[in-house]
Amino acid sequence: MSNDNNFNSLEEQRRRKAESFRLNISDNYDDDGVRGSSEPEEISSYSGEDVKHQIARESKRSLKKIRKEEKRELKARNRRNRRVFRIAWLVSVAIIGSAIAVFLITGMNDLLAINRKDDNATVTVDIPKDPTIDSVTEVLAKNGVIGEPDYFRMYATLTKSDTFSQGSYELTKNMDYQAIISNLQGNSRRTDTVEVTIIEGMSVVEIADKLVEEKALSDKEDFLRLCSSTDFDKDFDFLSDIKNNSERYYKLEGYLYPDKYEFYQNDDPKSIIYKLLNNYENRMYQKQDFGYDKLYSVHKVMDKFETDYSLDEIMTIASIIQAEAANKEDMYYVSSILHNRLDADSSMGVSKLGLDSTKYYPYRSEEALPSDVSSNYKSRYDTYDSDGLPPGPICNPGMEAIKAALKPYDTSYYFFCHDKYGNAYYASTIYEHEANLEYIDD
């Protein structure tokens, strides 16, 4: 009996120990089945094998159950997150799509001027200097020519319509984008025109000053640089035929034809020069009265009557005639004297033309010289120092001077002078000339 009691007591102890071990394992998990931070107690060496196996099985079942619960909860969270993301994505797409649709619809209406088709009001827009797409867009929006600045900016960028010019343009509000751009890139709608009269005998420098004064030109130095360049040779044969480029102050001197012109305010210097040169070329092919039996152009006279001079030399003679002669009649006498001296034998002592108009070129007179060069200035065109014609024209002559250069009077004169009233005196010898000078000085 005693042995049975001992056996039962031993079994009761083992049962209690197992129960206590299970409780320790359970205490390591929170209410949600998540494992705590503490580790299970080490199985005592005196525990029986059956208790150890039972505890291990219970532990595995508990862990498996916990992992299943965790996996189920993770899947549920993922499903919820996907639903939320899907809803948020659909809402975002709907909002963005709506915004794009509104932008495209309103933009297309503005592009095609649908929203302005009945508004034919005329406005004048002033495009600033060195315009950009942004500055042009701002001006158009400010004046009510466009209603969607961002869309116009995008359209102009995509169509590479980014080249604009400064000026004032007359536009109507019912124009579509392409019509607006076409008018801004052309000149048909420009309103900022100025009329400039270039007087016969003006030099390149004086023409530049006149253009600036009349606000047709803003950059005088660029204009003068172009007049010294070869930029226009490929377009005009009469310029490419010029030989002595290096000796000239301004290559285009003599070829900027005097006339009345219409330019745009702050016009492009190259455009101005092209207009002047085109006019010169046209005039050279127009028929003129040279006193022959029929009318001829300047080019025809040079070809038909076989002049000994090139066109550039004729223009140089014409420029001197323009600068020296007192009136139309005097032009033909001065021309005859220039031709006589140029054709004379060197023994006659008239190889130097000795013309006051060439002494200070490209300046008009000694008074016009810049202060920093006035004391020792020497012009390459000074005909008191060099024989024959200067390297090029000294001004831009009119047609009458050109005609006089081509067909001078037939005289025996080699000298001329004028009194203070513009009266001309001609002489065949130096003695007659000195007498004329003495007379006009009294």
Image (cartoon, rainbow, N blue to C red):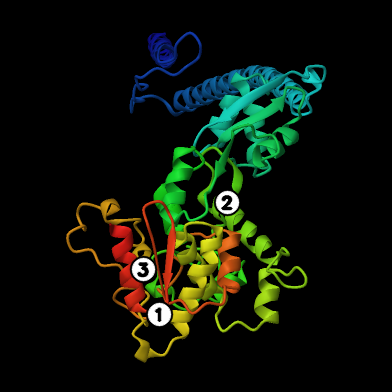
Q: Secondary structure at mark 1?
A: loop
Location of the N terminus (image quadrant): top left
Say whether residue 263 is left or right of residue 20: right
Q: Is residue 369 visible?
A: yes
> Of circles 3 and 1, which is in front?
3
Sequence-wise first label, 3 or 1 = 3
Picture coordinates of residue 424, whole percent (x, y): 44, 61
**Residue 368, percent across and down?**
29, 52
Whether label 3 touches label 1, CB < 8 Å: no
Q: Secondary structure at mark 3?
A: loop
> Residue at the location (44% across, 73% down)?
245
Q: Which residue is mark 3?
A: 355
Residue found at the very far left of the displayed protein: 375
**Left or right for 98, reference 417:** right
Q: Which numbered disc covers residue 220?
A: none
Quadrant of the image occupied by residue 132: top right
- Label number found at residue 271: 2
Specify which label sits upstream in the sequence, 1 or 2: 2
Does residue 187 lie above or below 168 as drawn? below
Crowding at mark 2 (Cα within 10 Å: few <14, some 14-19, many 20+): few
Residue 300 sits above or below residue 255 on the image = below
Residue 335 position, x and y percent, is: 51, 71
Indicate the amino acid at tag 2. Ser
Please, what secondary structure does the residue beneath circle 2 have?
helix
Mark positioned earlier in the residue sequence (3 or 2): 2
Name the spot of residue 240 as percent of width and height, x first. 55, 74
